[in-house]
Each structure stands twice: as C-alpha cells, then as structure tokens.
Amino acid sequence: MTIPIPEQSLVLLIGPSGSGKSTLAHQHFLPEDVLPGAGNETKLHEEVARRLTKGTLTVIDGVPLSAESRRHYVTLAREHHVALVAVAMDTPEALCLERNRTRTGSHPSPRALRNQVQQLQNALKGLTKEGIRHVHVLTPETAGAVAFEHRPLPSHRQDEHGPFDIIGDIHGCFDELKALLTELGYTVAPRADGAPGFGVGAPHGRKVVFLGDLVDRGPGVTDVLRLAMGMVEAGTALCVPGNHEIKLLKKLRGKDVRVGRGLAMTLEQLEREPPEFSQAVADFIEARAPHYVLDDGRLVVAHAGLKEPMHGRDTPEVRDFALYGETTGEADAYGLPVRADWAQQYQGQATVVYGHTSVPEAEWVNGTVCLDTGCVFGGKLTALRYPERELVSVPARREYWESRKHAAP
C-alpha cells in the first residue's frame, strides 16, 4: 500500500494509545517533520501555523480523537492552502493493551483505552465530512507494508529561469500567434516530415509560456493546439490551462457540460480531425499544472492570476482561483460575474503574469500584469518578454467574436 504525501502537507496520525502512531512516524518521516500531539495545544497550533506558512511538511503524532480537536487543523490547512492527510491506525483493542503493558511511562487505563478505540471507530465514519479529503486507514498488517510517497508539487518549477516569452489568451487566433512568435524571433513552419503540426525554432535559450484559453471562439483552434502541444513536448514551451480548456476537457471526457457557441466552434473543428487527436488534446489538458512558480520564485504564471499566499500551493481552492479568478458574487449589466480586483491589493514579491479577463492594454499593477488584450475580439495578441519586462503585441487581423462585453472572460 502506497500513500501519496504532497510535499506541502499537514499529516494527522490518528489512533488510540498503543496503535503504532509513533512507530509509523519514526519509520517514515524525518524527526524534524514530526510534532507531538500532546502538550500545550495553543503553542502547538502556533508552531503548525508557522510551519505551514513556510510550506514545511508537518506531521502531528497523536491528534486527539475528538472532532473538535481536528477542526482546528482543518481550518489551518485551508487557511494555508496545503493538503490535509489523515492516517488512522485501526489497531485492535487487545493489541493496544498488550503494547501499552510493555511501554514505560503513563498510558491510559483499559477503560480509557476502550473509549479511545470507540472514538476512533466513530471518527472513521465522518472524517471526510469534516473536510479531510485524504483519509487512509491502516491495520497492523497494512501498517507493516505501507510506503509513503513524497510527491513534489507540479507547480514547482523554480529551477526554470527562462528567459521566457509569456503569451496571453489566444482563443484560436492562429495567424496572430504565428505573427507574434515571428516578432519574438521564433520560426514557425509545417513539419518537415509532412505530418500534421508545426516545427517551431526558438531563439537560443528562450521558452514560451502559454497562459491558457488556447481554444474556443477563433477559427484556428486545432492549429493553435498542435503548435502549443508540439512545443511543450519539444521542451520549448510551458502551458497552464485556462477555464475554456477545462470545460473542453470535461466534454471530451464525456461529462455533461453546457455547450455554448465558443465550445461548439472548437468541437466542430476537432470533428474534422482524427479521433486520436481529441484524445491527445484531452490528455494534454489533463496533464497541465494550474500554475507555475518559476525563476527561483520570482515569477508566477496562472491563467487568471494568483494571490501571494497561494503561490506554489495545490488545493482545489488554489486551482479554482488560478483558472477562474475571484468574483464578488454579483453580476454586471451583461449578466457576467463581477471580478474582484485582487491585483489592486497584491503585495507579493513575485511577478504574477496572467490573462483571463481581456483589457485594452496590458498595464503593470503592483507587480502583476494581465496579457489578455482581446485578440479574438479584434484587439491584439500580447506577450511579455521576461525578465526584460518588454511587452510585444500584434494586432488582430479582424474581429472573430462579438461578445456581450469586450471584457468577457
């Protein structure tokens, strides 16, 4: 049995006295990663919060068995955008008693131990309902064979230093993408072997970063996909998904989604391709990280931007923000969600580059810049050269899509 542990996690070891929690912690985690669950609860919570702020893997050896005691850890994990993993030791009462008899120091009476065993059984019925998404139950047999796989987060690409050419929302505007890449010094030509796709030559050392929303609305969706997928495969590009890719992925995987005009255009273009191309597109989207932290943490790229406490984290809340941004819960006169302007309050050290909501001009706001300049709406396609901080744009050849509002995402 293998239990995946994301590198930024809060791990709760739960079980009655003598169930094997400390033995498990000693065998599978570094001593500096483990905090004892007993002692001053206030100081423990403060230490956990400090470690989670830094993104340090934290293991609590012996969380009290009451739901009230776990609730605070659920809150801490949510506030710091880290995975919360519960490992429950389902050890028979008789074995716990036997182990406690051979242990030095204090341990609970047989009656108290029986209460702990019953508390654990009650807890196992509702841990996921408490907000703990990752629950693993070990018996004495499985505990002896378990392995913990410490997984790096896919967003962590700090060792990639660029230089980068970061390109905003393309939405099927393939001619403009070719023109922009040419302006940036890349060469784009059909593949030499005659197979569908494109060969892209990159200026020495440079790499493209696509900010998502490659698809929908424009006439060249499949060409855009082939170019981006080919560059990622060749190692000359990175790509984060946009909300339009995620909706396309759901449709290609057979999920029930509302097919608007933009998605219908993409599906129509995909129908002209061999079936295996749609499968490759779905696999490509599914494999993308929602955001990347690059250049030793100095650069963060995400489709809709990302608040500073979420940088490098991986939870459903972080993924949703990276894809959709933040809304006020209100709708404007066009029926579109009102976007919360998170960039106005941004005070992080990293440069954040994003798209999602089109703007007439790319402008710097508190170390952030939105590169969606509405190419598909007749605006322009924009790239940021990093670290030069140079903005490069090409005009749209025409208006491909008339929206209810030019700034629609």
Image (cartoon, rainbow, N blue to C red):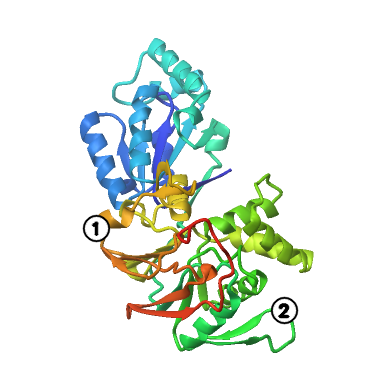
Residue ID at (32%, 77%): 389
Residue 154 x, y percent position in the rendering: 48, 59
> Residue 352's spot in the image, x, y percent?
35, 64
In this orientation, does residue 6 appear?
no
The residue where tag 2 is placed is 196
Judged from the image, the secondary structure of the residue bearing numbered disc 2 is: loop
- Give the quarter of the figure containing the N terminus: top right
Observer-nearest of 320 and 378 = 378
Residue 145 is situated, as x and y percent measured from the top left of the image, at 56, 42
Residue 104 relative to residue 86: left or right: left
Q: Quadrant of residue 344?
A: bottom left
**What residue type is disc 1 on?**
Gln
Residue at 33%, 45% (x, y): give it.
Answer: 80
For disc 1, the marked residue is 347
Give the SS element for disc 1.
Answer: loop
- Whole-angstrom CA distance, mark 1 to mark 2, is 45 Å
Mark 1 or 2 closer to N-term?
2
Which residue does the image show at 65% across and 71% down from the upper left?
219
